Image (tube, helix red, strand yellow):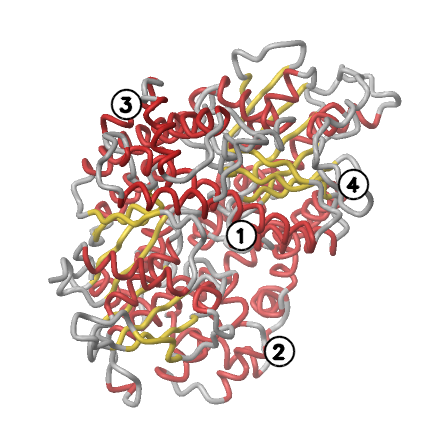
Amino acid sequence: MARSSAHRPSRVGPATAPGHHAGTLDVDALLDDPATGIIVCCGSGGVGKTTTSAALALRAAERGRKVVVLTIDPARRLAQSMGIEELDNTPRPVVGVEGSGSLDAMMLDMKRTFDEVVLSQASPEKAKQILANPFYIALSSSFAGTQEYMAMEKLGQLYRENVALQTDSDGGSADGTYDLIVVDTPPSRSALDFLDAPERLSSFLDGRFVRLLLMPAKGPAKLMTAGLGLITNALTRILGAQFLKDLQTFVTALDTVFGGFRQRAQQTYSLLKADGTAFLVVAAPEADALREAAYFVERLSEDDMPLAGLVVNRASPQPLNSQPGGDLSADEAMTASERLRRADATSPTAQLTAGLLRLHADRVRMVERERALRDRFATAHPQVATAVVPALAGDVHDLGGLRTVGTLLAGTADEPTSTL
Amino acid sequence: MSDWPKVRLHVVTGKGGTGKSTVASALALALATRGRNVLLCEVEGRQGIARMFDVDPLPYQERRLTTGLPDDDGGRGVVHALHIDAESALLEYLSMYYRLGRAGKALDRFGVIEFATTIAPGVRDVLLTGKVYEAVQRNRRNKSAIEYDAVVLDAPPTGRITQFLNVSNELAGLAKVGPIKSQSDTMMTLFRSPRTAVHLVTVLEEMPVQETADGIADLRGARLPVGGVIVNQIRPRDLDADELAAARAGTLDRERIEADLTEGGIAVSPDLVDGLLAEAADHAERRALEDSQRALVAELDVPSYELPRMAGGIDLGGLYELAGLLREQGMA
């Protein structure tokens, strides 16, 4: 049973700007809210989505929720520490979680998920035919959109099998295995791939070309239009006859399970849209990553998807002497540094001190640039609440590290950070 | 003298967030010495080149982008840019190799072009790499086109690069015979030759370095030529090893530093000195982690190059600066 603690009062600090700005993202309130059933972390590659997902899941579990986290491609040591280095498509309990909640973790096996869908939708004979087709093999293991679609498929499965029961019964009598699913999404080339995945599969199945390929198999030869003849001839010339034959077999075989596919894709899409879902856009304080994040925010609101906020990872640590009286601008530091470098060795530590000043200037400049980028984002997207997570010195590969990230996510965003 | 004198095709890959597009752009500038034409290509539809060089979004057409980094005598070559998208590449391919006429239009009308470029597995990559191949191997079918001395490809990320370049493998089982099959085999011959080098961009952090090592193993497994490793965004080196050790241990001489600061013209307060010392300790910690990763990069046994982190972000001037550093280190 989820702990029913009320939303924690928002913390003190300058971030909660008056009026139009959404201010700081209250991560704990989101995690504690029993109505939150799904959290989807999305964003471009290399911004720390997987770590963010795992840290959120651990924190939610240690605050009393029954959580499963679905990751896509975790770093080896992180996967090991969570006990999921085996890619077997099944949630495994994570050992070492403190408190009354629970945490299971799993790594997505894209091909196996696809195979399972085929097996569940088609007759055994048909399924066998599909699974052996070279097009299917390529589609299920390498097609750029498959990973996105399969992540959504697995999410839908987990939800239907473990969470839906509970929410459907009145008052949440909690016989589902989980009450919160945290999903890490594939590092999409385009931020939009992920949302488009269900739609894309649908439109593929409805595509004119696919329909044309199906025709000869379905009806009399007279349906072979002149256009199709031209196409098949052209394709045969370019690709060879076998290519077209395999493709036709594939599409024909899949046709029987099309309806099922589309229905599931649409179910998952509505699930994402429902109130119990919260999207978190994850970014790094870099122009590119924030631009991708902006596309994501726009796209999510276009589709009326429930956006909970933005997580900015790997922020440069604040200058440590930002207290009143200790303030020193980058320019001042550089001027003094150069002066010391020129003043030939009156002091044995002059070069050291000059170095310290340059490091300080470097740090101030990084922080200023990142703040400017975040401000620009906030101006363009004032409705998006934000959590800023400072960069840790090392990579995270154990529960302790995830706990630290969780703490940073939940609270210390605007405070000068300590070193780690 | 460049470390890669024979290479015509420089493929630049890297984990997301390591700055591979920046490095690809800087490399193109560095390669464009006097009288040389360099083509910088992107294939992921992000228009990163246009943003980086602050020009209008690029079409599927080679555009003169800028001049290269001047060499010692002030001579400079020209960098051109090309944004490759699969649909345009397919249409161009069809018109170049097949006179499809009515069938070509029908292909478009029935959604085959869209199908082939978005859904048919592997085909998309083959089309993108096919255009890159064409730019490197300009032949009689494309007579009026510029011949490039070097082509730099801002490629998909490390996790996907082997699959992306291993085109004949991607098509294996799909197109077993036919012209596509033989063309993809010809492309593989170039990609596997000493005229190609796949460079990997990383930063000195655990995951990117691990991914770089895995990427190199994958490339070698597919017999694709591994180029250099570009270590990007390295931290400033203002402190030497002894100073770093003292900073970590908290044994820097506080009084002397205070005196130095005063001499440097700064009004010293205890908070300020505390802050600087704490920053130094933090920096030393991160430098130590960098050094441990740098040792791993050295074990990869490929040439490596280092580029600094630019605190203020990277503008056009910054790109030329990075290009200069690559040239100094012999990458171009």
Residues at marks 1 and 2 on the same chain: yes
Report the side of A181 relative to A71 (left or right): right
In percent of width and height, residue A194 lies at 60, 49
Instruction: Specify the quadrant of the image occupied by residue B150.
Output: bottom left
- The residue positioned 55% from the left and 58% from the top of the image is A251
Element on which disc 3 rests = helix
Q: Position of residue A296 (x, y in %)?
A: 63, 52
Q: Is disc 1 in contact with disc 2, using a CB cutoff of under 8 Å?
A: no
Q: Disc 1 marks which amino acid?
A: Gly
The one nearer the camera, A246 or B311, is B311
Mark sitting on residue A222: 2
Q: Quadrant of residue A306?
A: top right
Q: Residues within 10 Å of mark 3 (few under 14, many from 20)?
A: some
Rendered residue at 42%/53% (across/down): A134
- Closer to the camera: disc 3 or disc 4? 3
Residue shown at 43% from the left, 52% from the top: A138
Q: Which residue is mark 3?
A: B245
Mark 4 — on which chain does it sit? A
Residue on which the image places disc 1: A145
Marks 1 and 3 share the same chain? no
* Mark 1 vs mark 4, CA separation in Å: 23 Å
The amino acid beneath tag 4 is Ala
From the viewer's perspective, tell me whether residue A26 is left or right of residue B296: right
In the rendered image, the vertical position of residue A388 relative to residue B233, given as above or below = above
